[in-house]
């Protein structure tokens, strides 16, 4: 097989775009041809079709039962999820919103009214650490949970107890106690016929879904390892203001505090780890890693991690993440197989000689679909599952890479190897024992030093 020229590839791409529909369920890929008319041997699937989940991703959810939603957490992600939900279907609305702070609630309410004509009355705007209960008890059908990650397990648990379908932003937990709550609640949700979707938008991004299908069909052979990256710049922070209490400051600056975010390997890098567990259908048995704090200016987190995960069949995944300005960036995933490799950078598959065998055609997708935003499409899938009475429970799936990220973090913090069995049974709990909106004991919120026993502040 020879390497494909740019001209040949572009001609193939144009033909594919003209001949078929692109996206899930259609002719979504461009498969380059071989010389001499010879045919490749039939691929051996990694997993048989029908044994893994493929979402349907139309532009808009089908019409059906009116759905009344509540939003818990009115910051950037919660506000984004609110508009994604409204853009995903007809016959959906938001009737209640809640946040720890009134200014966040009012800001979202004003934006919903100005941009979407959705008027959330004052009686359905809830404030405080217990606002989630008031939102869930307000007569909603579905809830969008986008609070700081440490609160998500108890919010999901309460929504499930009350019979409400949940959109659960990732990560779904920050410690083993939260992990076990999520897993148990996911089982309860499935038993109650509730639909649960998580903010893993790559599972609803057509380029990823089509790449996943090709890998499952055997195009790269058996998976032998991979590397995942979220190396980017510094995220936002908020300096403490004189009028803010201890807890108020930490919640407003939550992406910089371990107990709230789980550190950025959990809060952000879980996306990339999730891609590998999704494609490989494997979880880690152990993790050894390191990290450090170089330039972070608030909070008690690290700003870089490097983790070696040993998976349950013996292969290895290398995980890297960094939040430091002025460094080389890379947010992507790479999976190696016995016959070739898949990379999300370019969304393409190559053989062992570097020839491109398949490449996703983004232009054909744009020509075929009106909606290409995976943040909206995950809500399309969720609403369709609710209206069509189809089973959908993703919390237990994201819990696996979430726990792997926790394993990697704790290995880096302590300098020790962590194991799946050890961490899933651990009593480690990041929730402060004196949680309140006033003064808290700040002495335990310190940066971890590898080689020392690390116990989070309780």
Image: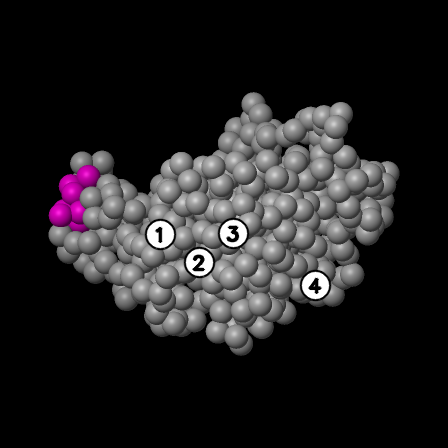
Mark 2 or 4: in front is 2
Mark 1 or 3: in front is 3
- Residue 424 tag number: 4
Mark 2 secondary-structure assignment: strand
Asked if residue 144 lies in the magenta stretch, the reply is no
- In whole angstroms, how far apart are the C-alphas of marks 2 and 4? 35 Å
- Left or right side of 78 for 183: right
Q: Where does label 1 land, which residue?
A: 88
Q: Which residues are magenta?
A: 10-18
Q: Position of residue 5 (x, y in %)?
A: 22, 38
- N-term mark: 2 or 4: 2
- In whole angstroms, how far apart are the C-alphas of marks 2 and 1? 13 Å
Q: Where does label 3 land, which residue?
A: 96
Based on the displayed image, in which of its 4 quarters is residue 312 positioned? bottom right
Mark 4 secondary-structure assignment: helix
Q: Where does label 2 land, which residue?
A: 68
């Amino acid at each position: 097989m020879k390497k494909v020229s740019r001209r040949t590839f572009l001609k193939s791409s144009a033909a594919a775009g003209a001949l078929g529909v692109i996206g899930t369920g259609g002719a979504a890929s461009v498969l380059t041809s071989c010389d001499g008319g010879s045919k490749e041997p039939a691929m051996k699937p990694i997993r048989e079709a029908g044994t893994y989940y493929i979402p349907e991703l139309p532009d808009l959810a089908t019409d059906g039962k009116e759905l009344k939603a509540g939003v818990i957490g009115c910051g950037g992600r919660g506000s984004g999820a609110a508009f994604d939900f409204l853009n995903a279907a007809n016959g959906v609305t938001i009737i209640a919103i809640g946040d720890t702070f009134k200014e966040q609630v009012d800001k979202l309410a004003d934006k919903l009214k100005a941009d979407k004509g959705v008027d959330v009355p004052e009686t359905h705007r809830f404030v405080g650490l217990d606002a989630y209960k008031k939102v869930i008890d307000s007569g909603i059908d579905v809830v969008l949970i986008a609070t700081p990650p440490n609160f998500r397990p108890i919010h999901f648990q309460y929504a499930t107890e009350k019979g409400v379908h949940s959109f659960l932003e990732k990560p779904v937990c920050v410690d083993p106690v939260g992990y076990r709550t999520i897993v148990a609640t996911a089982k309860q949700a499935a038993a109650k016929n509730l639909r649960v979707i998580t903010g893993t938008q790559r599972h609803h991004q057509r380029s990823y879904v089509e790449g996943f299908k090709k890998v499952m069909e055997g195009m790269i052979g058996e998976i032998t390892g991979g590397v995942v990256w979220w190396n980017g710049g510094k995220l936002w922070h908020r300096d403490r203001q004189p009028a803010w209490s201890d807890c108020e400051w930490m919640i407003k600056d939550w992406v910089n505090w371990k107990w709230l975010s789980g550190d950025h390997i959990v809060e952000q890098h879980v996306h990339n780890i999730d891609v590998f567990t999704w494609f490989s259908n494997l979880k880690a048995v152990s993790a050894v890693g390191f990290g450090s704090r170089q330039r972070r200016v608030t909070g008690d987190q690290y700003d870089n991690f490097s983790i070696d995960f040993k998976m349950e069949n013996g292969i290895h995944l290398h995980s890297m993440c960094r939040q430091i300005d002025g460094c080389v960036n890379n947010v992507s995933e790479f999976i190696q197989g016995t016959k070739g490799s898949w990379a999300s950078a370019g969304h393409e598959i190559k053989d062992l000689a570097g020839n491109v065998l398949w490449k996703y055609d983004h232009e054909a997708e744009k020509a075929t679909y009106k909606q290409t935003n995976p943040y909206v499409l995950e809500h399309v899938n969720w609403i369709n599952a609710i209206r069509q009475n189809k089973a959908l429970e993703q919390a237990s799936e994201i819990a696996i890479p979430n726990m792997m990220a926790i394993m990697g973090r704790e290995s880096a913090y302590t300098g020790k190897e962590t194991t799946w069995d050890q961490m899933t049974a651990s009593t480690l709990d990041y929730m402060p024992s004196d949680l309140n909106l006033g003064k808290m004991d700040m002495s335990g919120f310190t940066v971890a030093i590898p080689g020392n026993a690390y116990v989070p502040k309780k």
